Image (cartoon, grey):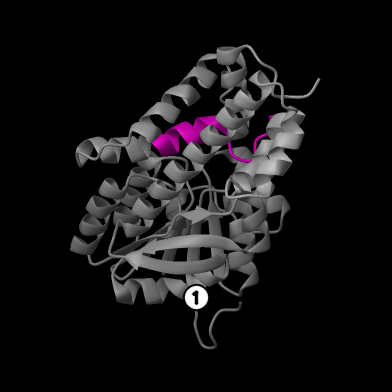
Amino acid sequence: MTAPEGQNTTVAFVGLGVMGLPMLANVASAGFDVRAFDVAPQARETAREHGHTVVDAAADALAPADVVITMLPDTPHVEQVSREVLANCRPGTLLIDMSTISPLTTVELARTLADAGMAMVDAPVSGGVKGAVAGALSIMVGGAPDDVERARPVLASMGTPTCMGPSGAGQATKACNQVAVAINIQAVCEALTLGVKLGVEPELLRKALLGGSAASWVLENLGRQMIDGDDRAGFRISLQVKDLRIATDAAARTATPLPGAFGVQDLYLEAIAQGEEANGNQALSRVYERLAAVNIARD
C-alpha cells in the first residue's frame, strides 16, 4: 500500500528490533516519510545499513512527526517514549503503540496524551517476524474511531488492522491471544509427555492429533519443533513470560480468575530458572521432560 495521494505524513518509528526493523521497512516502502530511532546504537546502525533514515536522538525523530509508531519491549519503555512525545511533539500528533503492554496503562497514557491535545491508538500485533517481513501482521487496534481511521493507512502498510473497541481494547485482545497461545503450547506439551509415557512415538502422535479436533497451529509448528529438539526462538520464553505477566496482572487488578494462565506462567518461570529465557517458547517441552523424566525430543 502507498500513502494516499496528497498525504504528506511524517512518521517517527521508535524501536528497531527483530520486529520493528521489517515493520519500518514496510512503512517506508508505502511512501511515508519515516525517521527511525532506537536507544541501541547497533540497532540504529543496522537500520542505516538497510537504507533507512535514522537519527541518533529521539527528539530528532519526534519533533517533526505527524505520527509516532512505537515497537518496544515492555510497558515502561512505552511510558518513557510517551513522555518524550509530550515533551517534543506538537498538538495533533498521533501515537500508535504496536508494542505489547498493559491494557490498563494504555488507557492511562491515552488519557494523558488527550489532555495535551494529542491522540493514542494501541495496535499490538500477532504474526511474528515472518508476518512483519511480509507485511501480513494481524493488528489488534484500540482507540477513538477518528484516531483509528487516521492510523489505518499506516497500519495497513504492515498488515491487517481490526478495530477492537476503545483505547486499551487492542492490548486487551493481545493479552487474550497470549493466554490462549501459551495454554495451547502447554496442552501440546502435556499430550506429547503422556504419549511418550504410554509408549507412543511422538511424531506419529502429533500427526494423528493433527487429523482431529486437537489440530492447531501450535501443534503443527511448535509441536514439530519440540519433537525435533529445535529450541530456536521465533518468540523467546522471556517475552512469553512478559506477555503472560501483562495478562495475569490485568487479571489480578480486575478480580478475574485465570488458573490456566497463572499455571503456565509458573512453568515458564521454571524454564527461565534453568537458563532457557532466550529459547523459543516451544522449549516449554523441556520443563515437561524434566518433570516427567521423558524424552519428547528425538535423539
Q: Is residue 104 left or right of residue 235?
A: left
Q: Give x and y (percent) for residue 170.
A: 37, 58
Residue 272 or residue 33, whichever sits in front: 272
Q: Quadrant of the N terminus?
A: bottom right
Q: Amino acid at mark 1?
A: Pro
- Quick one: SS at disc 1? helix
Judged left or right of residue 123, residue 131 is right
68 relative position to 38: left or right: left
Which stretch appears magenta? 230-244
Near mark 1 (Cα within 10 A), the count class, few <14, some 14-19 or many ≥20, is some
Point out the residue furthest to the bottom here: 5
Q: Is residue 230 at all visible to an observer of this figure?
A: no
- The residue beneath circle 1 is 153
Q: Closer to the camera, 279 or 296?
A: 296
Q: Is residue 151 magenta?
A: no
Image quadrant where residue 86 sits: bottom left
Q: Classify residue 163 as left or right of residue 106.
A: right
- Residue reaching furthest front? 198
Q: How many marks?
A: 1
Q: Is residue 40 above or below residue 295?
A: below
Residue 238 forms part of the magenta stretch: yes
Up the image or down, 92 lies above or below 124; here it is: below
